[in-house]
């Protein structure tokens, strides 16, 4: 018993000595903050050989999967099992409210209820995945969006989805109308818009997350106690949520913009046709009066 106590005391003394040394290093004045931030920015890369091919795995890929799995666990916990009396639990009520919010927002962009319900799963997927990937930096894991490939991948997926859903909702003729409205000369600019939009989505997400990441790394290195945790609530979680909302919101608006422009064109075409018909009827009445 005495021997065990002596060994435990020795281990504890060594532990606290090592802890004190590491703690002092965190506050050391001779730290090269620039080099430490540079190391944090660098991507961790690993290669796996599959036959003659090399597969690149980066920290962004690994952290993305960790964040997605964590988000799926949270969603599973919120949704739970359906109750026999058909009453919603608090978690289910949150999910339903969020879904209805996305549907109502999509409808405000000019989509009908059916169209809004159809885009909601993908829009929620964008929002939840980006939220999880951005917020995970609060747990000192590098956010995937600090790797420019992640925002670009999300933006390209979003713009392809916008084009596909536009074709589905308004058809090829409607898509052509979106390119030629208000005048045919706008076609080059409308096509350029499909390059600028994903670029804007990617750079906005990358710039905000990358800047927040560098700032939090600076705080963690220079003031490692308390302040990084408090600031992380905003720069990692709240700001990450805001960027996810903005990305999802803009993706919805791009689809709604196309649908609404086609609806307005069809309405104006109907009005023009009605005016022509009224003019024809008016001329027919005049000719009948003259004949009489």
Image (spheres, grey):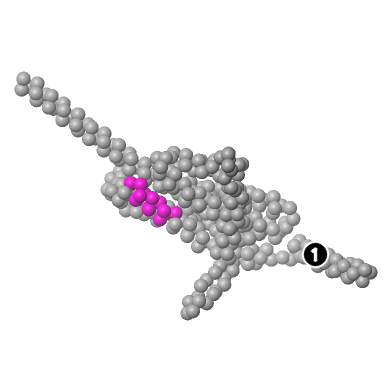
Which of the pair 66/230 is nearer the observer?
Answer: 66
Q: Quick one: which residue is furthest to the front in this view? A: 84
Q: Quick one: which residue is furthest to the bottom in this view? A: 52
Region rendered in magenta: 158-170
Q: Is residue 246 left or right of residue 20?
A: left
Q: Quick one: which residue is furthest to the right in this view? A: 2
Tell me residue 1's x, y (percent): 93, 68
Q: Secondary structure at mark 1?
A: helix
Which of the pair 208/30 is nearer the observer?
Answer: 208
User: Eyeballing the image, is 130 above or below 32?
Assistant: above
Q: Main secondary structure of the magenta part?
A: helix
Tell me residue 187's x, y (percent): 30, 51
Seen at 48% across and 49% down, the residue is: 121
Quarter location, residue 90: top right
Quarter location, residue 159: bottom left
Circle 1 packing at 10 Å, graded few (<14), some (14-19), many (20+), is: few
Q: For mark 1, what is the residue?
A: 19
The answer to whether residue 210 of the structure is visible from this angle is no
């Amino acid at each position: 018993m005495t021997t065990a106590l002596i060994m435990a005391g020795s281990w504890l003394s060594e532990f606290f000595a090592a802890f004190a040394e590491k703690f002092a290093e965190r506050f050391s004045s001779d730290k090269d903050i620039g080099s430490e931030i540079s190391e944090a920015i660098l991507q961790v890369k690993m290669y796996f050989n599959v036959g003659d091919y090399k597969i690149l795995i980066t920290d962004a890929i690994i952290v993305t999967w960790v964040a997605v799995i964590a988000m799926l666990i949270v969603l599973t916990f919120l949704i739970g099992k359906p109750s026999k009396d058909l009453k919603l639990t608090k978690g289910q009520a949150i999910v339903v409210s969020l879904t209805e919010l996305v549907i109502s927002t999509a409808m405000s962009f000019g989509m009908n209820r059916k169209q809004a319900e159809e885009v909601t799963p993908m829009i929620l997927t964008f929002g939840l995945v980006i939220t999880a990937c951005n917020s995970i930096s609060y747990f000192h894991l590098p956010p995937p969006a600090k790797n420019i490939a992640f925002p670009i991948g999300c933006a390209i997926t979003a713009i392809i989805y916008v084009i596909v859903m536009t074709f589905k909702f308004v058809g090829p003729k409607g898509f052509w109308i979106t390119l030629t409205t208000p005048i045919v000369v706008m076609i080059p600019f409308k096509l350029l818009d499909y390059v600028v939009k994903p670029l804007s989505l990617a750079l906005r997400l990358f710039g905000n997350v990358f800047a927040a990441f560098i700032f939090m790394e600076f705080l963690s290195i220079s003031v490692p106690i308390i302040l990084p945790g408090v600031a992380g609530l905003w720069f990692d979680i709240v700001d990450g949520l805001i960027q996810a909302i903005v990305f999802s919101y803009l993706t919805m608006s791009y689809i709604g913009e196309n649908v609404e422009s086609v609806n307005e064109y069809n309405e104006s075409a109907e009005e023009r046709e009605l005016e022509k018909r009224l003019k024809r009827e008016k001329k027919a009445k005049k000719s009948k009066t003259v004949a009489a």
